[in-house]
């Protein structure tokens, strides 16, 4: 192979590598935009919202509550109620029970998801344990409150939605979390 062909091939490979890196870097924001446009993925807001000033008493929506624990997390994590019926716009309070099964303090973080995904933008959390890390001492129990309402603009064809939380170990996802924790002697869940 001649020298100019080698140089052209090398430049082509370099530009292809840069292009792949750029695409990988932009993939997460592009995916978020795609999910917002199509209404898939079930992401909910990660900050508190205000209460609703209108309630649609002409219909009811069933809200199911589910809890998952990421593998390796030694906690018990369950909703106190499996489902409730609400009027869109009506503020409700439910609680999840959490227990650290470790002998030492650990930090968990619950990540919410709503199904069907299009309903996620209508599920409004006023107060949620998912907004903060949940540090628990070894063997400690906690009641974790959730205050929410379903936006009255929820499409009429959606009669049931499911709120699922997955509990993750903060220290595994962020190795420096132990250094910045307010809990002494925190170790990975």
Image: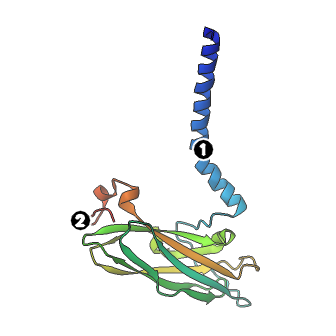
Can residue 50 be seen at all in this image of the molecule?
Answer: no
Q: Residues within 10 Å of mark 1 (few under 14, many from 20)?
A: few
In this view, the residue in front, 175 or 60, is: 175
Q: How is the image coloured?
A: rainbow
Question: Mark 2 and mark 1 in contact (Cβ < 8 Å)?
Answer: no
Asked whether, in this view, residue 181 is left or right of residue 45, the answer is left
Extreme front residue here?
1
Is 1 placed above or below 186 here? above
In the drawing, what numbered circle is on residue 147?
A: none
Coordinates of residue 30 in the picture (x, y in percent): 64, 49
**Which residue corresponds to the image point at 76% horizontal and 79% vertical from the top-left?**
157
Can residue 98 be seen at all in this image of the molecule?
Answer: yes
Q: Residues within 10 Å of mark 2 (few under 14, many from 20)?
A: few
SS of the residue under disc 1: helix
Coordinates of residue 66 in the picture (x, y in percent): 53, 78
Upstream in the sequence, badge 1 or badge 2? Answer: 1
Location of the N terminus (image quadrant)? top right
Please tell me how many numbered marks the rendered image carries: 2
């Amino acid at each position: 192979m001649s020298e100019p062909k080698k140089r052209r091939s090398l430049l082509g490979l370099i530009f292809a590598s840069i292009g792949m890196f750029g695409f990988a870097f932009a993939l997460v924001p592009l995916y978020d935009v795609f999910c917002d446009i199509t209404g898939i993925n079930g992401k909910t807001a990660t900050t508190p919202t205000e209460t609703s000033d209108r309630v649609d008493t002409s219909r009811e929506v069933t809200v199911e509550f589910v809890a998952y624990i990421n593998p390796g997390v030694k906690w018990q994590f369950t909703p106190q109620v499996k489902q409730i019926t609400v009027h869109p716009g009506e503020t409700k309070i439910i609680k999840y029970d959490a227990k650290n099964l470790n002998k030492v303090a650990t930090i968990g973080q619950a990540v919410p998801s709503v199904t069907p995904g299009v309903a996620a933008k209508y599920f409004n959390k006023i107060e949620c344990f998912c907004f903060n890390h949940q540090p628990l001492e070894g063997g400690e129990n906690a009641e974790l409150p959730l205050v929410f309402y379903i936006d009255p603009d929820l499409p009429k064809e959606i009669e049931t939605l499911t709120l699922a939380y997955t509990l993750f170990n903060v220290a595994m996802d962020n190795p420096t979390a132990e250094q910045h924790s307010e809990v002494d002697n925190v170790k990975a869940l």
